[in-house]
Amino acid sequence: MAGPVSRPAAATPADVMRARAETAMSLPAPLVALWSVRDGLSTESGVTVYSAGDIGERNATYEVAQYAPGFLLVGDDSGGRGFLLRADDPDSAVFSSGLGDLEPAGFDVVSADFAAWIESLDPPLTGMG
């Protein structure tokens, strides 16, 4: 039997402002809404949604702005695939791509929207922050 789901702290407004500055783009509203409840998460299967404090570094490391302009890397599967959203689209589908080849033409749609994708992830969810 699984233990209780942890209830991590939400990202602070300062964390979200820093994430906006570090990514140099607008952040998708559904991601900010998640951060208002919990600052990132990870699942038993290895899926991680980045915290506000980690998202800037992850997008810089994988050079997302250069290889997939207009997209924001929001998480990964701990196995070399990343999950991305269109930064300017509050209703963006969730896309998946190998982190070594961030060519938008090769992205796969894994969910029609971020909220549905979050709900589909296997519990328990644990906080990152």
Image (cartoon, rainbow, N blue to C red):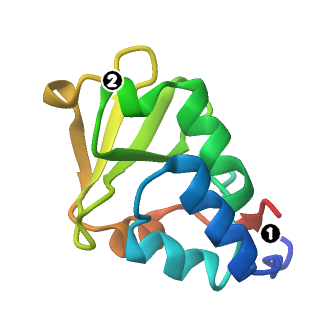
Q: Is residue 66 visible?
A: yes
- Going from N to C along the chain, the mark reached first, 1 or 2, is 1
Name the disc covering residue 67, or none. 2
Label 2: element kind: helix
Residue 35, x across and y down, in percent = 62, 75
Disc 1 to disc 2, how far (Cα)? Answer: 40 Å
Residue kind at label 2, given as amino acid type:
Tyr
Q: Nearer the viewer, residue 102 or 12?
A: 12
Label 1: element kind: loop
Q: Is residue 41 depicted above or below 56 in this figure?
A: below
Circle 1 residues within 10 Å: few <14, some 14–19, many ≥20: few
Q: Quadrant of residue 4?
A: bottom right
With 17 as the anchor, is 23 left or right in this view?
left
Residue drawn at x 48%, y 69% is 31
Residue annotated with mark 1: 2
Circle 2 residues within 10 Å: few <14, some 14–19, many ≥20: few
Residue drawn at x 68%, y 59% is 51
Residue drawn at x 34%, y 39% is 96
